[in-house]
Image: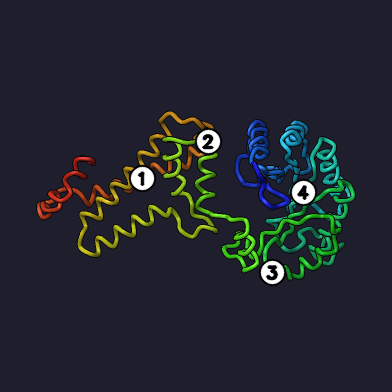
Amino acid sequence: MKSAGFAVRGVIEGFYGRPWSHEQRLDLLGFLGERGMNTYVYAPKADRPSWREAGTRGLAELAVRGRQAGVDVIYCLSPGLSLRYSDTKDVQTLCAAFGWAMEAGAAGVGLLLDDIPMRLRHPEDVSAFDDLAEAQVALIDAVFARTGRLTVCPTVYCGTGDDPYLRALGLIDARIDLFWTGRSICSPTIDLADAAAVTRTGYDPHESWERALADVVGDGPDLAAYRVFADNVRGSCLEPHDAPRLTGVLEQRAFARESGDAAAADRLLAVHAKELLDAAEHLLRGPVRRRALVEEARPWLEEFERGALALLAAARQDLRPHPRRRARKRVFGDCLEEFPW
């Protein structure tokens, strides 16, 4: 597959919660290589407390698989609040862990200094350094001297770039890469120069969304069902519209009810709820080709199904026959037969 015009393209395993298994990581490396990506960053947050005892844990095999797939494996550690910048033993322990990673075949290492306070925590560090940035520069220099290839996630990794902390961090070696997310953690807007660049790559977000779903899920009934589910978990800091189709249905329902057509409004909700339930039923209990994907998403799929049941219950409650609503039953008869109670 033709690669995108970015020097570094890939996936960071940097989430909180249960890390991926070794087998999942091996599978991921092949997946990335087949799609023109070139980087996998190992950085599970669950490993943060154990940086002093960090081992390679199958890193050598990951590195071999990565080279076969054309993917660099970057091994990261997060010393967090426990490391003492002024403690030679702590610094040597961290450098040794990174050294082992390089010897095991990692293409590079990453020092993650995010999600910590902007001040020194330990009294001995307060005595040894003027501020957090000075302490981190010393640590970064030591790690880079040991490894030769280093990426750092600074404590401040977004903004305008003129933060005093970042200016102080500019003292590090220019060959060290920094993680940077832009004006905000997930920047919702881009400037004209960025927009022009996107226009030249011909990026279409909807087409990309559909292509990604088909690539990961497959085609046929699985794709149709997963598309319905995925639309309901689409909201993010980059997508302001949570569950766009459901939001549209609820807005139409509210408008219809305000216009005096409550029957049509409730039928609209019932029909959409049935579509959601059908998708959940297929993914959770039907024959699907990518069963591992469904199992990974099962907690969210089960919540999705419960939400659909709640929507259907709301529609049914409003559709219940009532002595004063016989006209509604005549208008709404086919839906009442579809959803009997």
Q: Locate the C terminus and report the quarter of the image it occupies.
A: top left
Q: Is residue 28 left or right of residue 60?
A: left
Q: Position of residue 43 (x, y in %)?
A: 70, 45
Q: Work out whether residue 116 can be spotted.
A: yes
Q: Position of residue 312 (x, y in %)?
A: 30, 46
Q: Locate the N terminus and report the quarter of the image it occupies.
A: top right
Q: Amino acid at mark 4?
A: Gly
Q: How many C-alpha atoms fall within 10 Å of the one at disc 4: few (<14), some, or many (≥20)?
A: many
Q: Amino acid at mark 2?
A: Leu
Tag nearer the camera, 1 or 3: 3
Is residue 105 or residue 83 the one in the foreground?
A: 105
Where disc 2 sits, the SS reads helix
Q: How many C-alpha atoms fall within 10 Å of the one at disc 2: few (<14), some, or many (≥20)?
A: few
Which residue is disc 1 drawn over? 308
Where disc 4 sits, the SS reads strand
Q: CA distance from mark 2 to mark 4?
A: 29 Å
Q: CA distance from mark 1 to mark 3?
A: 42 Å
Q: Is residue 83 left or right of residue 231?
A: right
Which residue: 45% across, 41% down? 226
Instruction: Tell me, for residue 160, which label it has, or none.
Output: 3
Instruction: Tell me, for residue 110, which label it has, or none.
Output: 4
Residues at circles 1 and 3 in contact by the CB criterion of under 8 Å: no
Q: Is residue 215 left or right of residue 245?
A: right
Is residue 118 or residue 206 the one in the foreground?
A: 206
Which residue: 51% across, 34% down? 295
Tag nearer the camera, 1 or 2: 2
Q: CA distance from mark 2 to mark 3?
A: 38 Å
Q: Amino acid at mark 3?
A: Thr
